[in-house]
Amino acid sequence: MTRGSAAQDSGTAGLLVASVAVIAAIGTWGVIDPEGIVAIASQVVDASFRNRGWFIMLTVSVMLIFCVVLAFSRFGDIRLGADDDRPEFSTPSWIAMLFAAGMGVGLLFWAVAEPLTHFDFVRGHTDDGVAAHQALLATNFHWGIHAWAIYGVTALAIAYFSFRRGTPMLVSAPITYLFPKERWAHIVGWLSDFMAIVAIAIGVGGSIAMGVFQVADGIDVVMGGISAPPWLVATVFVLIIVAYIPPLLVDLGSGMSRLSNIAVSIAIALVVFTVIFGPTQYLLNSVLVGFGDYVTAAIPRGFQTPVFFDDALSRWFSDWTLTYMVWWIAWGPFVGVFVARISKGRTIREFVIGVLVGPTLFSVFWFGTFGGIGLYESLNGAGDLAALTASNVERVTFELLERLPLTTLTTVATIVAAFLFIVTSVVSAAFVLGTFSTGGDPDPKPKIRLMWGVLLGVVGAAMILSGSIDAVKKLIALGALPFVFITILLMVCLARGLGEELKMEAPGDAHR
Amino acid sequence: MLIGDPLDTLMNLVAFAFLGAMAWLLWRDLPTRPNSSGDSPGDTSDQD
């Protein structure tokens, strides 16, 4: 064994030990003292958002511009793989997989609740019609092209260096590949993998909590309750753990992607069902208006911060816009590895257009429909749903389904979809964490996967004990904040790698 | 007083220092790597 490889092995072992220790400590702290950890997370996150909100918004907007420039320049012709590689999946199937990976259970959770929460807040500042426009616009902005630009940059950096330069699928790989003999690069690389692991573990733990809250409330609705009792939340949590542990121990091949496709299919069926059985023309108008507002305002909104807002609006901006942007950054390494894996053989142009446009259009349709029907109820009905967002946000989607036909069927379908989204997310996350923590092993040992599965469960339990979705959002933001810097570094490495590739091609070389 | 909070200022200076470091990484020459002489990344021969 060479001195270099010995140092690398000890770095990998150190990464595994350090990341497991930190995640276990955070999880245990959260279980023992949930209020304490949330209080500290809130302080740190609030201070960071107050100080550097501009930095986060600028980063996200620059990432979007970077993606667009890559797609429409000569870099767009570069293929993610060998020049004769071709995509493994059809484009519609690829976009469906992107969407399932990137949004998952949050999509079901926030479908109605988020537009209505914004509507309820904004109507205090302006008239209802303007508030409805603003509510849809804010939701589409949070789930739209900026979110996918964050995923796109992370995935592109990992995919480019892995498929064209032969590096392992690690966040650190672009950095250590470009600067192989420089000590700072190895230190920063190690920290990048470490921070990616922490961001993924806390982000996925938050998703577990969100999914558990929603599934428990859905079951409670079916049982005729008014709010999911703690024993039901605990039972759902145990059921989810029991469901995701076995897949970690065996290789299910494409089984997990099939489950994920089922979850996406249910989500698509739900949105189609709502359009057909709900106030159809109102919802189609809502989708169109939401799309129009978004297209005209998306880019300028990416450069907005609450500098001239009053305290209430500044608070809203931190709690929603900044939190979402950091949330997507937290999911970046996890989704980035997955998106990279399924995108081999595509050109950068195909990749950017597919990743940015496909899921964004689906989001606009999704929120235009579910947000639209929630707004319809608020503007033309009793307005109960908007009031419910303040008291029991988990329940809003189910309360909406109660106002449509076939309630039991759609409620059970939503519960099943949420359950499948969580299980597939946790299993995939445990694989990615196993890969990251073992120095890039593409098929980590079952015991490593199991260990990460258990730790994700502990973090999920801590999130559930924190008691509210707002607390979960704070904890996710805390885990993701340091990763903002790493995402920028990945973008710089990608720019250098692509620039180097063009330089390496002699003038007149037309092999592509 | 129009003087800002020192902690805010410090945190923003850190952000600026980071952006400066990124600009330097974009500007500086890349070191020579053992496998970087003349191999085209898109060649099928060195890809799995």
Image (cartoon, grey):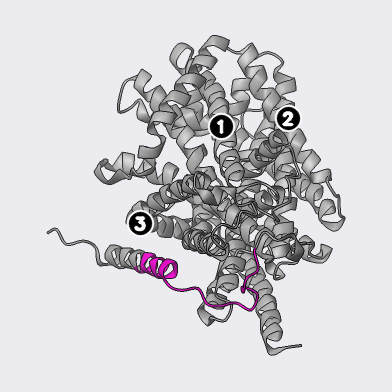
The numbered mark, 1 or 2, whose residue comes first in the sequence reads: 2
Query: Regarding mark 2 in the picture, which secondary structure is present there?
Result: helix
Question: Is residue A435 something that shows in the picture?
Answer: yes
Residue that carries the numbered disc 2 in the rendered image: A265
**Which residue does the image show at 48% across and 14% down from the upper left?**
A382
Q: Position of residue A258 (x, y in %)?
A: 80, 39
Which disc number belongs to residue A155?
none
Q: Which region is colored magenta? A: B17-40
Question: Local crowd at mark 2 within 10 Å, few (<14), some, or many (≥20)?
Answer: some
Which label lies toward us, 3 or 1? Answer: 1
Which disc number belongs to residue A52?
3
Query: Regarding mark 1 in the picture, which secondary structure is present there?
Result: helix
**How far is disc 3 from disc 1 in space, using C-alphas?**
28 Å
Where A499 falls versus A367 (above or below)? Answer: below
Residue that carries the numbered disc 1 in the rendered image: A363
**Which residue does the image show at 67% across and 80% down from the upper left?**
A8
Q: Quadrant of residue A193?
A: bottom right
Q: Quadrant of residue B23?
A: bottom left
Q: Position of residue A320 (x, y in %)?
A: 44, 42
Where A262 falls versus A302 (above or below)? Answer: above
Q: Nearer the viewer, residue A47 or A503?
A: A503
Where A92 falls versus A11 (above or below)? Answer: above
Q: Nearer the viewer, residue A130 or A464?
A: A130
Question: Local crowd at mark 3 within 10 Å, few (<14), some, or many (≥20)?
Answer: some
**Which residue does the image show at 48% across and 39% down from the upper left?**
A142
Label 3 resides on the chain identified as A
Q: Is residue B22 magenta?
A: yes
